Image (cartoon, grey):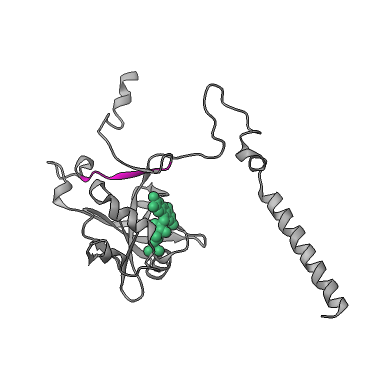
Amino acid sequence: MTKKGLLHACAALALAVTAASCTKKMEQTPAEANDNGKAQLKQVEGRKNFGKEGIITPLPCIMIATYDAEGNPDVMMAAWGGQCGHNLIDFNLSPQKTTDNIRLKKEFTVSFADARTVKESDYFGIVSANDVPDKVKRAGFTVRRAPNVDAPIIEQYPLTLECRVVEMSENGRVVGEIINMSADESILNAEGKVDLAKLQPIIYDSSTNAYRVVGDSVGTAWSSGKVFE
Ligand SMILES: Cc1cc2nc3c(=O)[nH]c(=O)nc-3n(C[C@H](O)[C@H](O)[C@H](O)COP(=O)(O)O)c2cc1C
């Protein structure tokens, strides 16, 4: 390299380093600059203050099932999501096999991990079909094709939503429309409604990294509060 070339290279490197450090400073909020923000934040008195280490609860254990281009089934766990409208579901996906499959097919099914399927469901959240293409089979689960969307139904999950993508952003935020819900008779109550006591869905407790079963009914929605009317 000539002397001039070397100088240009050094200048470019210096600019890159300065730009990177400026970007980092700009991206860093005052709260991040110090002890996760705890030192600079005003404390709520009489409580332990966690700064920005917030939790939202309950986080559902949504099992998203898809087909790839060759028709191989995949399923993954997503906890950062939920119902965002009458027949709408949303969740956030990192780059992985399911994300590619949903971009390709624009359709998927959603089921719910339950107390009977904790190990298999957690496995589906740990292992990628990019590394283990037969991960569904390896966990001992079976699939059949959903009748309304190009996606598999995982037979061991008794409640399934067939969904079509309404929106999918570059960074993996998905909004899906629920086309159909089907439930195994074994999780229905006497009135034919889905009975969560029978389904025993689990939630992800991000505070302690535990899975917890959804518990007993402790009130009636739109009604329990009427005692104060
Ligand atoms: C408790 C738990 C929650 C998870 N939540 C999400 C999530 O909301 N979004 C996401 O992209 N990945 C989430 N994952 C990770 C995926 O399930 C994981 O990357 C999976 O291996 C992807 O599989 P695939 O590549 O076959 O699609 C979660 C995993 C666990 C164990």
- 45 and 104: which is toward the camera: 45
x 12%, y 41%: residue: 190
Q: Is residue 6 left or right of residue 106?
A: right
What quarter of the picture does the C terminus occupy? top left
x 35%, y 64%: residue: 107
Res. 229 visible in picture: no
Q: Position of residue 131 (x, y in %)?
A: 39, 68
- 54 and 149: which is toward the camera: 54
Image quadrant assignment for residue 67 = bottom left
- 23 and 185: which is toward the camera: 23
Q: Is residue 90 above or below residue 53?
A: below
Q: Is residue 57 magenta?
A: no
Q: Position of residue 171 (x, y in %)?
A: 51, 60
What quarter of the picture does the N terminus occupy? bottom right
Quarter of image, ligand 1: bottom left
Q: Is residue 204 magenta?
A: yes
- 145 and 34: which is toward the camera: 34
| Extent of the magenta region | 199-206
Image quadrant assignment for residue 219 = top left
- Residue found farthest to the left: 190
Label count reads 0
x 26%, y 55%: residue: 160
- Residue found farthest to the top: 228
Q: Is residue 128 left or right of residue 184?
A: right
Q: Position of residue 124 (x, y in %)?
A: 34, 58
Res. 12 visible in picture: yes
x 59%, y 27%: residue: 43
- Residue found farthest to the bottom: 1
Q: Is residue 221 left or right of residue 97?
A: left
Q: Position of residue 105 (x, y in %)?
A: 37, 69
